[in-house]
């Protein structure tokens, strides 16, 4: 589950990086990049909810689950 959260966070980071390359030339795409990032955050919320249902909590620091 920690890896799933990490991958979502990495996806957001990559989206922001690519957005910076395109936004100057295609400002109309900005809302699409924002929507993609928001979807990643929604997925993280779902993952956290599953963890809470399964184990009763979600750690403040997911890196502790990656050891």
Image (cartoon, rainbow, N blue to C red):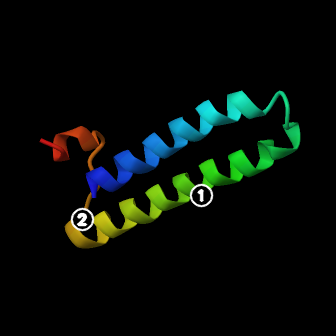
Mark pair 2, 1: CA separation: 24 Å
Residue drawn at (27%, 44%) of the image: 62
Q: Check contact, mark 2 vs mark 1: CB within 8 A.
A: no
Counting other residues with Cα less than 10 Å from the Cα at mark 1, is it few (<14), some (14-19), or many (20 or more)?
A: some
Q: Return the disc, 2 or 1, that comes first in the chain's sequence.
A: 1
Q: Outermost residue toward the bottom?
A: 53
Q: Left or right: where does residue 8 sit relative to residue 6?
A: right
Residue hosting label 1? 39
Q: Position of residue 56 (x, y in %)?
A: 24, 65
- From the viewer's perspective, is residue 65 above or below residue 13? below
Residue drawn at (59%, 58%) of the image: 39
Secondary structure beneath dot 1 equals helix
Q: Nearer the viewer, residue 50 or 33?
A: 33
Q: Nearer the viewer, residue 65 or 31?
A: 31
Q: Nearer the viewer, residue 25 or 34?
A: 25
Q: Left or right: where does residue 19 sit relative to residue 61?
A: right
Quarter-of-image position of residue 9: top left
Secondary structure beneath dot 2 equals loop
Residue hosting label 2? 56
């Amino acid at each position: 589950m920690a890896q799933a959260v990490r991958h979502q966070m990495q996806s957001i980071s990559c989206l922001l990086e690519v957005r910076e390359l395109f936004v100057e030339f295609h400002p109309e795409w900005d809302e699409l990049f924002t929507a993609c990032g928001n979807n990643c955050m929604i997925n993280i919320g779902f993952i956290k909810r599953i963890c809470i249902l399964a184990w009763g909590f979600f750690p403040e620091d997911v890196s502790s689950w990656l050891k």
